[in-house]
């Protein structure tokens, strides 16, 4: 995260200073931008600027913008170009990887197709025809500026022990509203009435965590029957269960991260707290209802029939209870209203600076052949980097030392980034180099991209000297872990191959809280690699002893549990992305994390408490 520590380390903040009130670049309006461009071209003295009524902070920011661009022109174009040619010696591995990528991408497309249908055809018909509501993806079209949003963990909830819960019953992601990047959380009521499953809670908590870490304002589209009752024990009592969502809403508000809600369906029980804890809420006539217990429970308890409208409809909550702040007579009106509300939050859009950049010199389609089928099929990681970096240019750091880790600087769509990429086992030297480099990035406030392909196993030591080497490596890896954990800059991890064991922590795995973590569909995530259990009998072999059979089952279980889809279903990542889309996703994430640099950071206060 860009934070006080980072600013202090850059000398931009006095050690005793209060948390920074960063100047708001977004207050630059078009007129001003035009003026500053004219100024840059004509090289008018600063005095003229003052005469034109422009404030000092703005002058400084302009200089920063200009100097950033100038810096890019001066330096990036001179970074050495990587040689990304696939040599003939790599061809057979490349072909093998390609075949594997095509198979896993086919599976990925099938899963996405399943998810796009929500709770299925009948449920969609019930939702749209009988209940007269818009399908959740239609709602997002009305809410967001455009369709180029970043959807998070769409495969979450598939093939869970309690069945398939498409998209975990709730779409989450980051999209632009009125030009500002916002996190959205939208229940899909076609999935069991939008009720919340344990995986749905986890998905929404992760979205809130992203909002907090990146200081993104949040929008809830609530259409939920509350807790999925058969799983109540996994939803209610513990710290990271359902109640945490409401706790977070208060904390986020106190952190000055605004949250707004649209009641676009049933909000029963737990579902009712989401809009009532939000800072501002809109409710839709005839569609939105909000109550702790619905009409069936009232009937059971009192014998009295009451309509949902009378019990907790839009009129009641807008005119009597005050639980809602705006009444909308249709869905369309509600999304227009919430967009207007967002425009009052005083979050101006990011400056629209088009950073000039070059495309990589090599085709991103070839990443499919570079995505390792298994660890033994890994090709030099610079072949991957040459397909992701602007102009395939890369300023390598310590090129000849600890070569099993590649470190250096490059640009992705004009954004300067530090790269840390596995290129073999994380040896002692490689880890020391990683530590050093991560600290450099932190000192310089440069976001770090981790390309993870960790080794599934390390050879057991067979001598004293090897044991010594192991313990030295352990110490070096621990130092890199500390550097990664404490680096006060945005971190994005892409698992391009293996995510195995402790080396995955060093490479900013999930428990090291990267701002975003994505997997390629070929990725394998496990403590150990099942494919290295060589003593296990082959499938179909019936002459197994008890121990062998157990081992065989263990291997099969490990194999199944290591896939990228298994991981993503459980939210161990923020989603599976196609290798050829990696550059676009990274650029989007970098833009999203950039937004907080322009936000006003203020000390923790009280949340907005609804009166
Ligand atoms: N737990 C488990 N399943 C639930 C559920 C709950 N709280 N609420 C609804 N469902 C299931 C229904 O059994 C139904 O399952 P099916 O498709 O397998 O038949 C599905 O969700 C859709 O429910 P349905 O009532 O047919 O849809 P609807 O759109 O007409 O109404 C609700 C949706 C949420 C308004 C309505 O189901 C309701 O009021 N549910 C009870 C909510 C409640 O009291 N929650 C308390 C939680 S503490």
Image: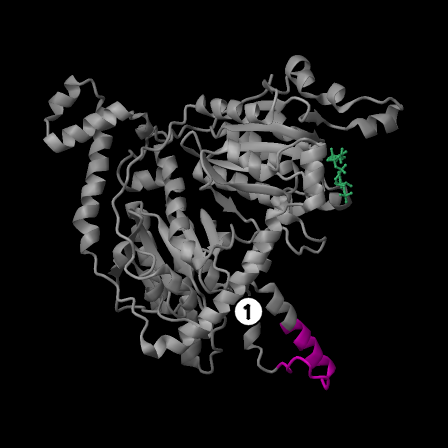
Q: Quadrant of ligand 1?
A: top right
State the image coordinates of residue 339 (x, y, percent, origin top left): 49, 26
Q: SS of the residue at dot 1?
A: loop
Task: Determine the residue positioned at 43% across, 80% down.
Answer: 464
Q: Is residue 63 above or below residue 537?
A: above
In the image, is residue 490 above or below residue 579?
Answer: above
Range drawn in magenta: 536-555
Q: Position of residue 311 (x, y in %)?
A: 75, 21
Where is residue 263 shown, x and y percent of the image?
62, 27
Q: Quadrant of the C terminus?
A: top right
Above or below: residue 311 compared with residue 40 = above
Q: Residue furthest bottom?
A: 543
In this picture, residue 415 sits left or right of residue 269: left
At label 1, counting other C-alpha atoms closer than 10 Å, the crowd grade (few under 14, some 14-19, many 20 or more) is some
Percent x, y for residue 292? 73, 28
Residue at 37% over, 59% down: 364
Q: Is residue 487 left or right of residue 210?
A: left
* Residue with the mark numbered 1: 528
Question: Is residue 3 found inside the magenta-colored segment of the image?
Answer: no
Q: How many marks?
A: 1
Report the quarter where the N terminus lies: top left
Is 436 left, or right, of 213 in this rendering? left
Task: Name the residue at the right extreme.
Answer: 303
Q: Nearer the viewer, residue 549 or 586?
A: 586
């Amino acid at each position: 995260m860009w934070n006080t520590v980072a600013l202090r380390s850059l000398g931009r903040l006095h050690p005793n200073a209060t948390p920074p009130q960063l100047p708001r670049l977004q207050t630059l309006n078009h007129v001003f931008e035009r003026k500053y461009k004219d100024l840059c071209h004509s090289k008018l003295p600063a005095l003229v600027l003052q005469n034109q009524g422009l404030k000092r902070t703005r002058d400084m920011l302009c200089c920063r913008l200009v100097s950033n661009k100038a810096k890019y022109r001066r330096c990036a174009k001179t970074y050495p170009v990587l040689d990304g040619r696939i040599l003939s010696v790599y061809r057979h591995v490349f072909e093998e990887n390609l075949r594997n990528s095509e198979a896993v991408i086919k599976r990925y497309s099938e899963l996405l197709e399943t998810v796009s249908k929500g709770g299925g055809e009948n449920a969609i018909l019930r939702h749209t025809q009988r209940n007269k509501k818009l399908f959740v993806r239609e709602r997002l079209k009305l809410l967001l500026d455009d369709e180029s949003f970043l959807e998070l963990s769409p495969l979450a909830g598939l093939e869970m022990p309690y069945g398939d819960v498409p998209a975990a019953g709730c779409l989450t992601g980051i999209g632009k509203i009125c030009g500002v990047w916002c996190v959205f959380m939208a229940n899909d009521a076609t999935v069991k009435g939008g009720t919340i499953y344990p995986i749905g809670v986890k998905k929404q908590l992760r979205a809130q965590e992203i909002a907090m870490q990146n200081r993104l304002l949040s929008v809830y589209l609530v259409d939920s029957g509350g807790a999925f009752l058969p799983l109540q024990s996994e939803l209610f009592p513990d710290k990271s269960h359902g109640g945490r969502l409401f706790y977070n809403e208060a904390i986020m508000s106190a952190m000055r991260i605004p949250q707004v809600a649209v009641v676009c369906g049933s909000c029963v029980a737990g579902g009712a707290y989401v809009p009532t804890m939000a800072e501002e809420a809109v409710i839709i006539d005839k569609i939105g209802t909000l109550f702790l217990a619905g009409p069936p429970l009232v009937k059971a308890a009192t014998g009295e029939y009451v309509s949902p409208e009378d019990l907790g409809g839009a009129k009641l909550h807008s005119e009597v209870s005050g639980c809602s702040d705006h009444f909308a007579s249709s869905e369309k009106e509600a999304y227009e209203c919430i967009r207007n509300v967002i425009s009052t939050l005083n979050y101006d859009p990011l400056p629209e600076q088009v950073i000039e950049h070059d495309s990589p010199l090599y085709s991103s389609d070839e990443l499919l052949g570079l995505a390792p089928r298994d660890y033994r099929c890994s090709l030099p990681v610079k072949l991957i980097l040459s397909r992701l970096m602007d102009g395939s240019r890369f300023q390598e750091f310590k090129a000849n030392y600890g070569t099993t880790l590649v470190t250096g600087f490059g640009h992705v769509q004009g954004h300067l980034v530090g790269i840390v990429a596995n290129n073999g086992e994380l040896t002692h030297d490689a880890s020391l180099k990683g530590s050093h480099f991560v600290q450099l990035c932190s000192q310089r406030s440069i976001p770090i991209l981790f390309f993870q392909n960790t080794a599934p196993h390390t050879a057991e030591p067979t001598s004293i000297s090897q044991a010594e080497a192991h313990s030295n490596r352990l110490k070096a890896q621990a130092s890199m872990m500390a550097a990664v954990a404490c680096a006060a800059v945005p971190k994005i991890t892409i698992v391009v191959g293996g995510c195995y064991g402790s080396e995955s922590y060093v490479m900013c795995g999930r428990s090291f809280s990267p701002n975003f973590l994505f997997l390629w569909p070929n990725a394998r995530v496990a403590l150990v690699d099942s494919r290295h259990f060589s003593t296990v009998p082959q499938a179909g072999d019936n002459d197994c002893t008890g121990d062998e059979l157990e081992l065989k089952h263990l291997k099969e279980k490990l194999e199944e549990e290591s896939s990228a889809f298994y991981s993503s279903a459980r939210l161990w990542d923020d989603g599976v992305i196609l290798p050829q889309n990696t550059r676009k996703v990274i650029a989007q994430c970098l833009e999203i994390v950039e937004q907080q640099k322009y936000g006003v950071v203020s000390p923790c206060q009280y949340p907005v408490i609804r009166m």
